[in-house]
Each structure stands twice: as structure tokens, then as C-alpha cells.
Image (cartoon, rainbow, N blue to C red):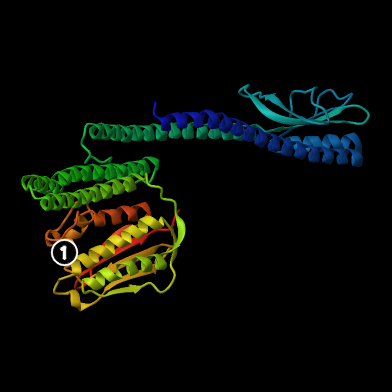
Amino acid sequence: MAPPMQLALAALALLAPAAALFATFIGWQVDRILSERTLDALRVEIQGFRSDFERGGRASLAAAVAARSAEAGRGSYRLELPGTPAAIGNLAESYDDIGPGGRVFLMQQQGDGRPRQAAGIALPVPGGGRLLVVYDIEDQAAFSRNLRAVAFGGVAVLTALALALGWLHSRRYARRVAVMTATSRSIMAGDLAQRIPRDRSGDALDHLAADLNAMLARIEDLMQALREVSDNIAHDLKTPLTRLRNRAEAALRDDAPTAHRDGLERTIEEADGLIQTFNALLLIARLEAGAVDATRVACDLSGLVSDVAEFYQPVADDAGLSLTIDAGQPVTLSVNRQLVGQAVANLIDNAIKYTAGTPTAASGPIVVSVRSLAGGGAAIAVADRGPGIAAPDRDRATKRFVRLEQSRSRPGTGLGLSLVAAVARLHGGAVKLDDNAPGLVVTLELAPPL
């Protein structure tokens, strides 16, 4: 049995008896109130007969009873006096168990013989005798019975409706769970492109499907990145390893000591380049896995960016470029200072490397800026005057080992922007690439800690 149906049955097991008891209580209360009102009316009428007796004695009382008995109504009267051969009134039977306090009882009708509910009260006559006044309250008893029947019928209808709704919701729940299970099995079989269907109802299962789909998308991206990294490592590391081997062979073939030393130096340079590449790969992997100590400390990003930019100022001067820092106002944010500093260094290094020697290099300075974002975040932007990146290629540019055609002639591993993107994700932000007309603007957005 599906959980919604179980919940519906559990709720009904608690609510149905409570509703039945409530309906019974309401019927009993209505019956009691109506009976009390009838007894009050009887007491008022008895008081009238007492007044008749006080004014004219037994004769006046007998006349009043006879007159009332002749009237059409729900009242029945019986006056029993000593020495009188027959009772006066229209009530044939004497109910000896009814006293001055009054009570509700079943009265046997003479016509069809069916008992009817009645309320009666007795008045002892001074000097002997007894006056009995009885009201037929079968209509109000029927009303009370009908009220209870309607209440119980309502409980039964609500119970049936709740069961029907529970069954329908249970069927819907079971179908959705079955779809989720089938999709999960397809995913486990290796089809990572599958997604769990959503009905946009906004319920718990819909939210769960949305979270699972987001998780699957992330897993698919990571798997695709892993495949791309494997292919790119095999492709991009093959060239430096081949150069490393060729230089070692060339040094071995040449007997001159200077050739050996030169060959070893070049081999060490190539090895250092490979080590840097693998270190960058390891750092990116650790960042994306969340395994890096990302302890945040309050940091003035304006000061941090200024320090990194000043370090690269001589490099820009040597390349014949102008480097401008736009970080006047302090922008304080809790970040991992070392990682953010490395990301900014990568952006400035890329800007200098790809701007130097281009026809548009003299059109303006490389600008490094810091600004606050709404919500407490910050944005660090580096705008260069290089060839830029075409809009269709900007999403690819942050992938590992991706080197666009215009960068193939320049040294590099294609990991710089990947590292920046990983640092941004670690800080809950993102990297945005925009046109600088001419050149490229790379913006590193950092979010405040949760």
C-alpha cells in the first residue's frame, strides 16, 4: 500500500470515530435543549392552571381543563378529582410515574398504536386529585433523529470521499514513483542523459525530482569533463613528452659536454612545465571535489587585487603594455585569500600574454577592477585589448585543456580559466566572459558565505 493511502487510512481511523461521537453529541444536545424548552412550556401552562384553581377552586380548574382539551393542539390533559366518576380532559391514560418535575416518555397512541415521544408534568390538586398535562414532542424527536442521521451520513460521505481521494493520490504517487524507479534504473545502466520527469506540481516528489535532475546534470558534466580531460591529457601532454625524449636522445648522441648540459637544462625545463600542468590539474580536481581547505577569512579584495596587479606591473611594462588598477574603494568579503589571489594572477597573466604583440594592444590599457555586488558579493574584472574570444567559444574556454585557435601559437596548458572557474564555484560564484570591443572582459564573481 502506498504511503498516501496509509496516511489517509490512519487519519480516518482517528477522525471518523471522533466525527461520529461529535455527531452523536450534537443530536443529544439538540434533543435535550428541545425537551427542556418543552418542559418549560409545560411548567408555564401548569402555573396557569394553578392560577385558575386559586381564583375559582376545583370548578374553575375543571372548566379550564375542559376548555383546553377541546382546543386543537399538541396538548393533552387529564384532571382526576375525588368523587368524580370520570377524569376530565382528552388524555385517556393516567401516567402515575409522572411527577411535578416532569419527564420525557413514550406515549402509546390510540390510532395506529405506535408509541410517540411526549413530555408530561403533573400538578397535585389541593384537597386531593391530580392534573396531568402532556405535550406530543414526536416532531422534535424526529428532527433530532434526522439531524443525527444527516450528521452520520455526512461523516460517511466524508469518509468515502477521503478514501477515494487517498486512493487516487496513492495511484498517482505510485505511478510517479514507478517512473522515477524506471528512470533511475536506466541511469544506473549507464544512460546519464536520462532525467526524471516532473509534473510541476510543486510537491515533495516534484522538488525531489528537480534536485535529482540537478545532481544528474552535475554528474553528467563531471563525467563529460573526465572524458575530455583524458582525451586532452593524451593529446596535449604527448607533445611535451615527445620533446623531452627527443632532447634527451639528442644530448646522448652529442659527445660534447656543453651539449649534455644544454640537453639536461632543456629536459628540466620541459619537466618543470609538465609538473606545473599536473599541479594545476590536481588543484582543479581538489577544488571541484571540495577537498581543498576553503576556510574563509575577511579580506580586502581591493588590496589583494592591487597587490597582485603591482606584482605583474613589470611584466606588463616589459611587454609594452599599460596595466591600470581600478580598486579605490575597499571591498571586504570572506574568501580563501590564496585561491582568489591565484585566480586573479591567472587572469592578469592571460590578459598580458594574449594582448602583447596584437594590433589592438595600443588601443587602451589592461584594466583590473573590483566592485561590490548586490547581496554582499564582489566581482573582480580583468579587461584586456587582445583578440578576444568569439561568443560561441566562450563556454568552452573555461574547460580544461581547451585552447582556441588564436592561442595555439602561445605557450600555455589551457588550464588557466579552468582554475579560475573552479575557484569561483568554490566561492559560490561564476566566471563571465564578455566582449571588450576590442578584447575580452573576464569577470570573477564571488558570493558571500552562507
Instruction: Give the answer, above or below, for where 397 lies relative to 387.
Output: above
Report the residue that reaches farthest toward the right.
127
Viewer-proximal residue, 279 or 159?
279
Report the residue that reaches farthest toward the left.
253
Choose top left, top right, bottom left or bottom right for residue 350: bottom left
Residue 162 in view: yes
Residue 51's x, y, as percent? 87, 41
Viewer-proximal residue, 209 or 37?
209
Residue 345's x, y, as percent? 30, 62
Residue 151's x, y, as percent? 55, 34
| Image point (28%, 70%), residue name | 314
| Image point (89%, 34%), residue name | 58
Viewer-proximal residue, 143 or 73?
143
Choose top left, top right, bottom left or bottom right for residue 253: top left
Residue corresponding to mark 1: 390
> Tag 1: Cα neighbours inside 10 Å, few (<14), some, or many (≥20)?
some
Quarter of the image with the N terminus is top left
Mark 1 residue element: loop
Instruction: Give the answer, above or below, for where 178 lies relative to 393.
Output: above
Residue 25's x, y, as percent? 64, 33
